[in-house]
Image (spheres, rainbow, N blue to C red):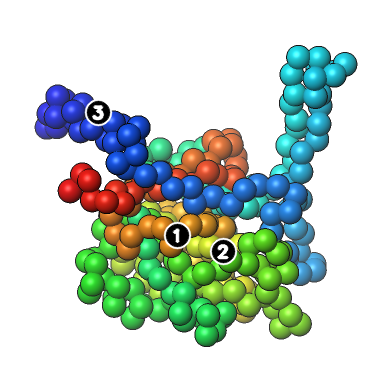
Amino acid sequence: MTDPQAAATALSTFLDAVTTGNLEVVDLTTALSSSTPALRLPAPFANLIDFSLEEVSAYNEPGPFWRHNNIHTGEHVGTHLDAPVHWVTGRDGDDVSQIPVRRLIGRAAVLDLTEQVAADPDYLLTVADVESWERTHGRLTAGTWLLLRTGWESRGDSEAAFLNADDTGSHTPGVAVDCARWLATEREITGLGVETVGVDAGLAGGFDPAFPVHHYFLGNDKYGITSLRNLGRLPAVGAMLVVTPLPIVGGTGSPARVLAVIDPDGALG
């Protein structure tokens, strides 16, 4: 049984370290605005609406002492979480309001693919890539979020560069089919986080199965988070991830603020 006093002391030490800056909180979230890049599905598929603000009042007659807005957005715009019910393989799973909150906090494992993606924007993570990472940093543990650093965030100020599309499709990195299946079934991770517009590669609609990260992860009660930034500020292991989607009843996903807590100087040992 956990010692309540020891747990309280550990929590107090953690909060003191955050307050004093001995632990650093890093924002991994892309700011949400009308210019935030969003997924563009080809016809005949329907797209979500872009994010926008609608002013209701601004210290004027409709509201003389306050300013407030309506927001309009799709669930899967900007940095967002994909819940299991988002995909046909997870249709009987949790919606975003049903996700156990304990699974929204966990260890972060950062796998760096920037060199591979610089040479090939269609690069796909392989099982061999993950096993190589594990030989250095240890096996991915239960409850871990696997975060793919690809350098793609550098394109985030231009939707054209971010989507990187031509007549053959969108050329963005992702995960190979066998690796998606292996991670979803052979590792007890919570989910996958990426810097790109979606958790699958841009050309993944042509894979078998189509969009394998969605297919295997959401079908195995795992999650996805997208459009992350600042992964280069995180260590390969040792960071804590906090994912905060809106608890939308019936929601297939939600824009989310994603934060990492790191010990930059090893102050806590």
Counting from the top left corner in percent of width and height, residue 195 is at 53, 62
**125 or 253, which is in the foreground?**
125
Label ID, residue 231:
1
Asked if labels 1 and 2 touch by Cβ distance under 8 angstroms, the answer is yes
In this rendering, is residue 12 above or below 172? above
Which amino acid type is shown beneath numbered disc 1? Leu
- Is 103 placed left or right of 250 in the picture? left
In the figure, residue 168 lies in which quadrant?
Answer: bottom right
Secondary structure beneath disc 2? helix
Q: Is residue 151 left or right of residue 5?
A: right
Residue nearest the observer in this picture, 147 or 67 = 67
- Of callouts 1 and 3, the N-terminal one: 3
Q: Is residue 64 above or below residue 204?
A: above
Residue 141 visible, this angle: yes
Q: Nearer the viewer, residue 185 or 242?
A: 242
Assign a secondary structure to mark 1.
Answer: helix
Q: Position of residue 67 (x, y in %)?
A: 75, 24
- Image coordinates of residue 204 in percent, x first then y, are 59, 75
Q: Is residue 11 visible?
A: no
Residue 199 picture location, percent across and down? 53, 63
Q: CA distance from mark 2 to mark 1?
A: 9 Å
Crowding around mark 1 (Cα neighbors within 10 Å: few <14, some 14 to 19, many 20+) is many
Residue at 23% x, 51% y is 266
| Label of residue 153 in the image | 2
Real-space Cα distance between discs 1 and 3? 27 Å
Q: Residues within 10 Å of mark 2 (few under 14, many from 20)?
A: some
